[in-house]
Amino acid sequence: MNDSDIHHLAAAYALDALDLDERAHFEAHYHDCEICVTDVIDFRAALAELANAHHEAPPAGLRADVMAKIVETRQLSPRVAARQSTRTRPWSGRGRQFAMISTAVAASTVLAVGGGFVVGRSDGNPYNVAAADLLARDDTRVVDLKGEGEGRFRVTWSPSANKAVVTADQLADPGDGQAYELWLIDETGPHPLQLLDDASDGDIRRVIDIGDDGSQLGVTVEQDEGSPTPTGPILFAGAI
Amino acid sequence: MNVLRQLRNRPEPAADAAPGTDHLAFLLQRAGRGSQESFAELYDHLSPMVFGIVRRVVRDPSMSEEVTQEVFVELWRIAGRHDAARGSVTSWAATIAHRRAIDRVRSEQSARDRNDRDEAKRVIEPDEPATLVESSLDAARVRRALGRLTAAQREAIELAYFGGHTYREVAVLLGVAEGTIKTRIRDGMIRLRDELGGSR
């Protein structure tokens, strides 16, 4: 998709009329594009007016239900502080610890084959244990990230476990001093999720901690220390 | 390059253009710091719009109620994150409500045949824009704006927004090329934005 094509998706994006992959690609693009940001803001304002004109009173009991529910719902910290904290998400550090364990053990008993996983014994390898656990859960979804990147990139994610496994095969060598980095993309843009610095042989087997506060995943190549914001093109993306 | 944008006559947001806008921002700010009373008041202002969006997209009454509740719990959760530079409180709430409703119907896709062209077309009456909105002053303004769109643009936008369809689905439903639908949606939205003044 070339650049002018992607600008033209702003209206469809504001209407939520993109399919999930296109939505991910657009979200990865538009935060840095002044034209698209302005367009989306303006289109959404117009749509809010359209929606307002179609208002409909909700059932009377709903207000009490909502108020009862919010009492037990923790709020996110206000925006300025929150933006800072998303740069160093606490769980990306934990993910890295998992990763160090994971790379120390051969992750060979779970393979992404064709459309599904072939699960072997859980031999104590964190990746295999996590994969077996995720595959046993009802809410687990398999997300194939798609894009221009070479190879296959799959994330198997369970919201109830707050955990995912990343499985990638036949990736292009990211190059000296560079590594694949996984991004969680939400309304405020891409946030660093996990540096995937073990892809020198083209394969990745990785357990990551992942919250439920994003809607898309993206993958770029960055310097191997990781980067606070994506600097390279989005090579793979998909909705979670 | 973007001549339309340069030429379009976009009025400055007048102080009285959006009565209550400042008040809603004030309520949201307080809600973001934990004020339940402010949030309750915000609910009273926003819930008819939110429910209206959800109801049209989701259709099923009890599921609509559930999704509306989820939307408000989410608004409460992220109240402190609202960025006024990215749109008004109303626009923010409409965006979240619509996204949540869409995500719900797409995940429930198998529960109903959303490719049924007749069913989908029942959502809109492209030849009768007057029936699209309820009667109120705002509605009259919106109806006038909709009247400036071509019937084809209006149809594509409403199938997408209220029908909950992707532009690709809209193309299939109408038997029209995807590129054509993209263009109708874009041109229609630009016109709608210009008619409604955008920046609220």
Image: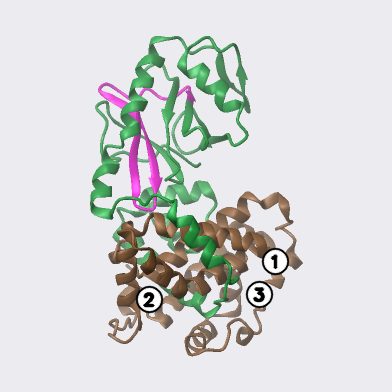
In the rendered image, residue B161, in percent from the top left (x then y), is placed at: 56, 67
Tell which circle, 1 or 2, labels the residue nearer the N-terminal end: 1
- Is B58 covered by the magenta stretch? no
Provide the residue span drawn in magenta.
A167-196
**Colour applied to chain B:** brown
* Subunit of label 2: B
Query: Which amino acid type is marked by label 3?
Result: Ile
Among the chains pictured, the one given green colouring is A
Disc 3: CA contacts within 10 A as few (<14), some (14-19) or many (>=20): some
Instruction: Quickly name the residue at label 2.
Output: B198
Label 2, label 3: how far apart the Cα atoms are: 24 Å
Disc 1: CA contacts within 10 A as few (<14), some (14-19) or many (>=20): some
In the rendered image, residue B125, in percent from the top left (x then y), is placed at: 67, 78
Q: Is residue B176 visible?
A: no
- Is A185 covered by the magenta stretch? yes
Tell which circle, 2 or 3, labels the residue nearer the N-terminal end: 3
Instruction: Quickly name the residue at label 3.
Output: B124
Quadrant of the rendered image containing residue B39: bottom left
Give me the residue at 42% from left, 20% from top: A202
- Label 3: which secondary element: loop
Quadrant of the rendered image containing residue A179: top left
Q: Is residue A157 visible?
A: yes
Query: Which amino acid type is marked by label 2?
Result: Gly
Identify the image quadrant of the N terminus of chain B. Answer: bottom left
Query: Which amino acid type is marked by label 1?
Result: Ala
Left/right placement of residue B176 relative to residue A16 reads right
- Label 2: which secondary element: loop
Residue B120, label in figure? 1
Label 2–label 3 contact, CB within 8 A: no
Left/right placement of residue A185 relative to residue B16 reads right
Give me the residue at 61% from left, 17% from top: A119
Give me the residue at 66% from left, 83% from top: B127
